Image (cartoon, rainbow, N blue to C red):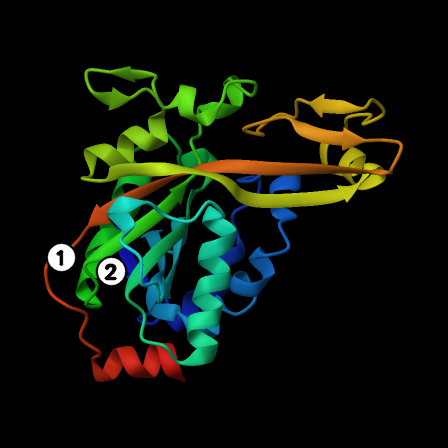
């Protein structure tokens, strides 16, 4: 198994998008994501990684460098994943110096899950961020066990632990890798659509007012049939990884990758 960045292997760009069935359809409708995913290949190739098994990409990861003057250990923004994307794009447009990196996604091919690839990619991400001169990696983690408890608050869900580790499988991977849970991001993702769109995305009727449980959603979707729309606001969990103790140094390679 080999892990590479897109900056190192730009010819692999097409393999990034060949991950069928890894996300539910409704999860692909966050409009903020278009700010990053439509431009990440050009702007941030050194923060995009692939795990290769021969010629096949079996896992991928995306990060974004951003400027922020807060202390990650003291709390990170409530807007979570959406905020990280907006802040990363704003940092790029203003020319500010990035101070930390936010993970956005680690995805494993459906038929390759259960083989430890998520930990492999997290370790590779941590090493890559440190090699690029950053000391802090944050992640608005989407707990993959939470859909089984859609009505439970995220704060309550985080109390589910065994031997000091989270019961949630994905959070447990982060903590075992050295991450520290900082705070809940209650407004991490926003997905809104018409009732017809939600019916198309989920196959559910969306004809009653109030919360509707949707497979793979962490919390219920709020349906407003009299107004013709429904909205999903997903909470995530901020995790902080200390990946190095050196201040960020801008190498020539880093300037070309990020700035050009």
Q: Is residue 106 above or below residue 217?
A: below
Residue at 57%, 66% in the rendered image: 38
Q: For mark 1, what is the residue?
A: 244
Q: Of residues 34 and 246, which is closer to you in this image?
A: 246
- 1 or 2: tag closer to the N-terminus: 2
Q: Position of residue 132 (x, y in %)?
A: 22, 68
Residue sitting at the far right: 226
Q: Is residue 168 above or below residue 135?
A: above
Q: Is residue 26 above or below residue 134?
A: above
Question: Disc 1 to disc 2, how far (Cα)?
Answer: 9 Å
Q: Tell me the tag on residue 83.
A: none
Q: Position of residue 11 (x, y in %)?
A: 42, 71
Give the secondary structure at mark 2. Answer: helix
Residue at 76%, 44% in the rendered image: 193
Nearer the observer, disc 1 or disc 2?
A: 1
* Residues at marks 1 and 2 touching, judged by CB atoms closer than 8 Å: yes
Q: For mark 2, what is the residue?
A: 129
The answer, for residue 83, to whether it is visible in the render is yes
Q: Of residues 187 and 257, which is closer to you in this image?
A: 187
Q: Residues within 10 Å of mark 2 (few under 14, many from 20)?
A: many
């Amino acid at each position: 198994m080999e892990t590479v960045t897109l900056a190192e292997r730009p010819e692999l760009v097409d393999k990034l998008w060949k991950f069928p069935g890894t996300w539910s359809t409704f999860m692909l409708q966050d409009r903020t994501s278009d700010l990053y995913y439509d431009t990440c290949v050009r702007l941030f190739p050194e923060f995009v990684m692939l795990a290769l098994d021969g010629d096949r990409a079996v896992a991928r990861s995306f990060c974004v460098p951003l400027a922020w003057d807060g202390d990650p250990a003291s709390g990170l923004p409530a807007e979570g994943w959406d905020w990280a994307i907006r802040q990363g794009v704003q940092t790029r447009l203003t020319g500010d110096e990035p101070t930390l990196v936010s993970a956005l996604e680690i995805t494993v091919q459906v038929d390759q899950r259960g083989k430890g690839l998520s930990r492999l990619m997290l370790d590779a991400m941590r090493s890559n961020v440190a090699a690029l001169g950053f000391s802090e990696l944050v992640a608005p983690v989407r707990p993959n066990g939470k859909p089984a408890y859609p009505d439970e608050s995220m704060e309550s869900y985080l109390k589910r632990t065994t031997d000091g580790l989270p019961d949630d499988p994905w959070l447990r991977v982060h903590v075992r890798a050295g991450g520290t849970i900082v705070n809940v991001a209650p407004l991490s993702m926003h997905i809104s659509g018409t009732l017809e769109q939600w019916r198309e995305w989920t196959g559910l009727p969306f004809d009653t007012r109030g919360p509707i449980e949707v497979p793979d959603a962490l919390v219920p979707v709020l349906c407003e049939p009299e107004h013709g729309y429904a909205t999903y606001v997903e909470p995530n969990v901020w995790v902080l990884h200390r990946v190095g103790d050196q201040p960020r140094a801008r190498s020539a390679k880093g300037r070309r990758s990020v700035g050009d």
